Image: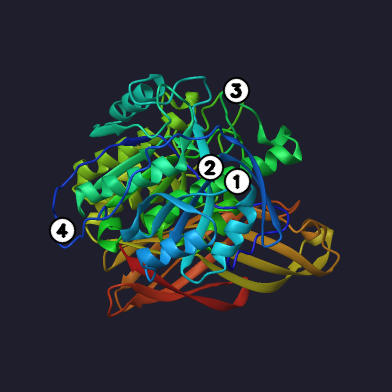
Amino acid sequence: MKNLKIKSIYSLVLLGVAILLITACKKKDTNSGVTDLLTDATEYTGTYPEPAKINYVVQGKSFRLTAFPGQMIAFFKMTASQADASQLIAANGGSILAKIPSVGYYFIGIDSSQTSSFINTMMANGLVDGVIPNVISYPKSGVAILDQCGYAHGQAVQSTLQNCAGTLDECEDVTLGGGSEDAPLSKQIPAIINEANKNNGGTTLINLSFNGGLDTKNPYDYATLDTLKKIEARDCWFTFMYGILKTIAILPPQIRENLVITIAAGNENMPLGDLLEYLRTLTGIADVLDNNVLIVSTDNIPGIHANFAHKDQDVVVMNNSTAWQGTSLAAPCAMGYIQAIMSGQGVSAKQALRAMKMASLANPDREVHLGDALTIAASIKSGKIYIGGPSTLIGSITWNSGEHGICTVNLSFEMKSVMVSWDGTMGTLNIPAVVTVELISGNCSPAENNGTDSKMMSGNLAGSNTNITGSAMAYFILGTSPPLPLTLVFNGNKNTGGDLAGTFGTSSFTGTVLVVLKHQ
């Protein structure tokens, strides 16, 4: 894959998620300037082969997935015409099974033995933005239930949505039908585009309660898997998630503006942080994760934890009463909260999504409480909220640890995000931060293990729009040391664009980092 630089210790591809419970406060034709996305689109009506293990190599990297052999998904850049796409696909031995040309989506049939060569050759062409196998996804519920609308899984998702203050617009079946538990990515992508197209720029709320990974009818612990199973779980999750996020990224900006999707994180106890960080390096994905997507985990599954990334700003924890069955039933509750915030505070879908993420980041356990999110949404509506980051402040200090000796260390403040509430004269500052100490020289036992700790740093701001000052503080445990009080100091102002601009520094060392906090 073009420009694909994957960490050597992991095998990655591109993304996953599945059955669509589509819930929406729909505003038909609110943007008459939006073009019909389904112009010249075709639908796949053929049969699907049996899912199988697929091993292939892209730019020297090996991948292992469960997918539908001989079926590929390609995203073309908007500079490519239908004729360009058709010619390139045919030249590489492919046939078009379905397409949505307006956004550059093509579902392609190939000889399954040519998977590696097809992907590599296609991705070498400048008109192609991404090519992935048609991966499979599963219900993420931790129990053996069916996954189709009208069956147990779909009914449970709908019930949870409604119990969490949400309302159902419609349920669209994207499985293979007949109660099948298999959900192809090639069904979910057109369903998302179709739903966004029907709303024509109006509010579109979609819940995805399936995900890529391994079939989890019988829950397992990622940590206990053998190496091949771990690779397969990560490759499938990443590939399927890429497909969903890339689908959102290729939609016109005026449609993305009012689109929010909640996604079940999965139940495999699999760490997601580095996968999400890599996804953000791919074109358009960081913006989609920030503005359109909420990945929902839970701490409620008995005997095992859901997939997690407790330091990631786009992952939240929901511990509603049905989440013990899996993230399938945590995600729709998060969507219910989003609807409740929209109706309760009169904010947009994007503003409600922002309030959910901020409420999660403000809680050390990352659990979202509806009351907190409603309060934050009110501040967003009143124009008081500013958000920025990530930013990192690094410097060296001499650490006198008393009986443990004196040493020189690098001290790093990684600010995952910066959240400010400011009314013109006073405000609050919240920073989910990761502090790392790295020993440079000397004999200082608390720093010898290069300790790292994450905390929410909080404090107050005061002044005027032309002179804002304040600080945020927290106690960090680094290495074997006792809790160490650390402070970040902010100095800034409200700029002509209406954003807050300034610097963060610390009394621990000299040096600052510039930040711009965007008005929400």
Q: Quadrant of residue 380?
A: bottom left
Which of the image's four quarters has the C terminus? bottom left
* Residue 472 visible in the picture: no
Question: Foreground mark, 2 or 4?
Answer: 2
- In depth, the one of 443 and 342 nearer the eye is 342
Question: Foreground mark, 3 or 2?
Answer: 2
Q: Which mark is residue 112?
A: 1
For the residues labelled 3 and 2, say whether their Cβ atoms are less than 8 Å apart. no
Which of the image's four quarters has the N terminus? bottom right
Q: Amino acid at mark 1?
A: Ser
Q: Amino acid at mark 3?
A: Asn
Q: Position of residue 171 (x, y in %)?
A: 29, 31
How would you rate the neighbour count of disc 4 (Cα within 10 Å): few for under 14, some for 14-19, many for 20 or more?
some
Q: How far is mark 1 from mark 3, CA to CA? A: 29 Å
First reached walking from the N terminus: tag 2 or tag 4:
4
Residue on which the image places disc 3:
218
First reached walking from the N terminus: tag 1 or tag 2:
1
Q: Amino acid at mark 4?
A: Asn
Residue 280 as seen in the image, left or right of residue 346? right
Q: How far is mark 3 from mark 2, CA to CA? A: 20 Å
Q: Label 3's element? A: loop
Residue at left offset 27%, top offset 49%: 196
For the residues labelled 2 and 4, say whether their Cβ atoms are less than 8 Å apart. no
Q: Label 2's element? A: strand
How would you rate the neighbour count of disc 1 (Cα within 10 Å): few for under 14, some for 14-19, many for 20 or more?
some
Q: Which mark is residue 294?
A: none
Label total for image: 4
Q: Which mark is residue 31?
A: 4
Residue at left offset 35%, top offset 52%: 354
Q: Amino acid at mark 2?
A: Val
Q: Which mark is residue 135?
A: 2
